[in-house]
Image (cartoon, rainbow, N blue to C red):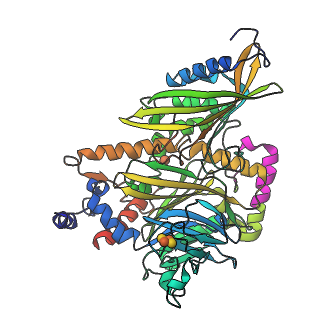
């Protein structure tokens, strides 16, 4: 992406580059760097799978509903040895595809993706898959995430049992 | 072969309650054996009362939901006369699952195989080719969707039993009933299950989750990151130490009841909720005092409870109010369901902080539950060494008259009941 990118001239390829880089940070457990992709008013959501994908966390039980503060705390936690579920860190790989720019609205882009993430820990491999909905802003020629909503397509987490890494 | 194995299991001691040696131990075999799981199905899951759901999940006439309980697939309905029914979700004709949706609203259910139609109460209403059946066929009790042998509820909590001779629900709940009532007393308007179910699984024996659910001992180490997180939240916490007691309630039920520094939407304020929040929390507390008197209001508002109802129901009345139930499918695999409960008439701001609170600690994406899951799975893995290291020790606080919330008395109660039901010991 060029330094002069604006909301109007960002292309799908720009968005893809951004999302692939995001996935790479997650997969390599560079979570403090990953956190820098988010705006100060950002949110990260993983709804439960029996609610409307657009449901609000104020009145529905989610798996994850972090504001920017708690997202920062999540990152802090996951980088500690005492975050037992992720010690040692699981091996994770994301595939992000079907990227589309759905809307250009105000100062925001609405993006949808399909994602697949594999996670291996203790010699057990689980698959997480679903739809990613992003609200991206462009500031000073750079993209940033204002909202990331990872909507699992599976029936709950019946095999996976936890969503302890970043989707 | 099976018979031989059964005998071996029968003659072995799974619970070692050695009073003289001041030691209480549980055989690790109890967590890994298929024979024992089969026996648990026969002696426990088929015999006791099991949690089905909360009345608020079926809000209006015609509402239904499907759910697995005790190895059965159930259809839970509310009929036009507001009566609740717990039906076995299998067609009396030739077996098909009749309702294949997870929830909804319906006037009747039509089996998709040959088309028999059932009412919300399970009665057979119609079938294609009726004329080929003898008169009165539809009215035979065996032509209906079969109800579970026993169905009853307490203050909105609905239970089923597959044992026609089971004791009354009230007798079964025993001393746990009073704690369920404290929970139900959170709101005069009643409680409701909030939308959204956390559905997950754990690759571990189901009894490990029962133990973990009222284990006050593990918090400081296993949940260190959660406690560190709490300290860094805005305005911090209220200066209350984690103190309280554990109680073996009999019948395998148990509870830990304690004070804690976190916020409770009913009704312990924390600075993070601001002055506005303080006004609302004070008002909730005053209402509780007016209705229940100061002592009970204090207990409802300022004490936390992790209540375990034998064999697989957990009510956490902590920084949020949750129901959790779990069912084994293999000795080393269980499915878990968790719901959030809240006062029906709760202010949207309190509802929102309640759910924010819930996710902070609880559930497969929380800051604590995933570490519990990891611990349970690592215990299960550790049991591979059972030939050389055959026992779990749960002796903590054995000599104390009033066991602390971080002792293991409540677990000993659980295992004593398990042992009695399994081996009559
Ligand atoms: S199995 Fe249901 S109608 Fe035949
Ligand atoms: Fe725990």
Q: Residue at point 49% right, 54% down? A: B336
Q: Nearer the viewer, residue B360 or A47?
A: A47
| Helix, strand or loop: magenta stretch | helix
Q: Residue at x 63, y 52 (%)?
A: B196
Residue B422's image quarter? bottom left
Q: Position of residue A124 (x, y in %)?
A: 38, 37
In what quadrant of the picture does the N terminus of chain B appear?
bottom left
Can see residue B256? yes
Task: Locate residue B281: give its quadrant.
Answer: bottom right
Q: Is residue B277 magenta?
A: yes
Residue A12 screen position, x and y as percent? 68, 20
The residue stretch that appears in magenta: B268-285
Does A93 appear above or below B221?
above
Above or below — where is B361 with respect to B130? above
The residue located at (34%, 71%) in the rendering is B43
- Please indicate, yes or no, whether residue B263 appears anywhere in the rendered image: no
Front-most of A73 and A155? A155
Residue B17 falls within the magenta-colored stretch: no
Q: Locate the C terminus of chain B and report the quarter of the image it occupies.
A: bottom left
**Residue B364 screen position, x and y as percent:** 53, 44
């Amino acid at each position: 992406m060029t330094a002069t990118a604006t909301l109007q001239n960002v292309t799908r390829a720009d968005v893809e580059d951004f999302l692939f880089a995001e996935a790479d940070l997650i997969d390599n457990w560079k979570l403090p760097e990953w956190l820098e992709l988010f705006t100060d008013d950002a949110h990260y959501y993983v709804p439960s799978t029996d609610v409307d994908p657009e449901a609000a966390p104020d009145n529905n039980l989610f798996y994850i509903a972090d504001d920017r503060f708690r997202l920062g705390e999540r990152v802090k936690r996951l980088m500690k040895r005492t975050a037992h579920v992720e010690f040692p860190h699981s091996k994770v790989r994301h595939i992000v595809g079907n990227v589309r720019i759905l809307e250009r609205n105000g100062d925001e882009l609405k993006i949808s993706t399909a994602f697949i993430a594999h996670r291996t820990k203790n010699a057990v491999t689980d698959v997480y898959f679903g739809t990613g909905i992003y609200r991206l802003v462009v500031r000073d020629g750079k993209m940033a995430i204002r909202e990331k909503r990872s909507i699992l397509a599976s029936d709950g987490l019946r095999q996976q049992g936890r969503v302890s890494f970043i989707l | 072969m099976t018979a031989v194995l059964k005998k071996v299991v029968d003659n072995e001691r799974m619970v070692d309650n050695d009073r003289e040696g001041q030691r209480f131990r549980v055989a690790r075999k109890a967590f890994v054996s298929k024979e024992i799981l089969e026996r648990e199905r026969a002696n426990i899951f088929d015999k006791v009362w099991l949690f089905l759901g909360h009345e608020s999940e079926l809000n209006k006439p015609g509402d239904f939901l499907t759910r697995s309980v005790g190895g059965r697939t159930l259809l839970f309905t509310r009929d036009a006369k507001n009566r609740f029914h717990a039906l076995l979700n299998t067609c009396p004709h030739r077996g098909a699952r009749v309702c294949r949706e997870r929830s909804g609203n319906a006037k009747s259910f039509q089996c998709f195989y040959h088309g028999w139609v059932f009412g919300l109460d399970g009665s057979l209403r119609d079938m294609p080719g009726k004329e080929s059946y003898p008169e009165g066929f539809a009215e035979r009790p065996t032509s209906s969707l079969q109800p579970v042998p026993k169905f009853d509820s307490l203050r909105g909590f609905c239970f089923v039993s597959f044992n026609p001779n089971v004791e009354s629900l009230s007798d079964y709940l025993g001393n746990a009933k009073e704690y369920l009532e404290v929970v139900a007393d959170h709101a005069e308007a009643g409680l409701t299950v909030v939308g959204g179910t956390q559905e997950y699984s754990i690759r571990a024996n189901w009894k490990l989750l029962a133990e973990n659910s009222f284990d006050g001992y593990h918090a400081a180490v296993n949940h260190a990151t959660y406690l560190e997180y709490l300290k860094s939240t805005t305005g911090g916490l209220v200066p209350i130490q984690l103190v309280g007691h554990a109680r073996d309630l009999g019948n395998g039920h148990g509870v830990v009841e304690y004070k804690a520094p976190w916020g409770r939407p009913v009704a312990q304020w924390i600075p993070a909720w601001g002055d506005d929040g303080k006004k609302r929390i004070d008002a909730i507390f005053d209402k509780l005092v007016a209705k229940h008197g100061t002592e009970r209001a204090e207990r409802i508002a300022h004490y936390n409870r992790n209540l375990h109802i034998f064999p697989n129901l957990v009510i956490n009345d902590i920084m949020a109010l949750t129901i959790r139930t779990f069912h084994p499918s293999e000795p080393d695999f269980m499915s878990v369901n968790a719901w959030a409960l809240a006062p029906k008439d709760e202010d949207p701001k309190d509802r929102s902080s309640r759910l924010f609170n819930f996710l902070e600690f609880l559930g497969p994406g929380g800051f604590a539950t995933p570490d519990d899951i990891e611990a349970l799975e690592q215990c299960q893995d550790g049991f591979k060494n059972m030939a050389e290291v055959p026992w779990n020790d749960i002796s903590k606080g054995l000599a104390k008259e009033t066991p602390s919330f971080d002792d293991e008395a409540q677990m000993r109660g659980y295992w004593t009941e398990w042992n009695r039901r399994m081996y009559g010991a």
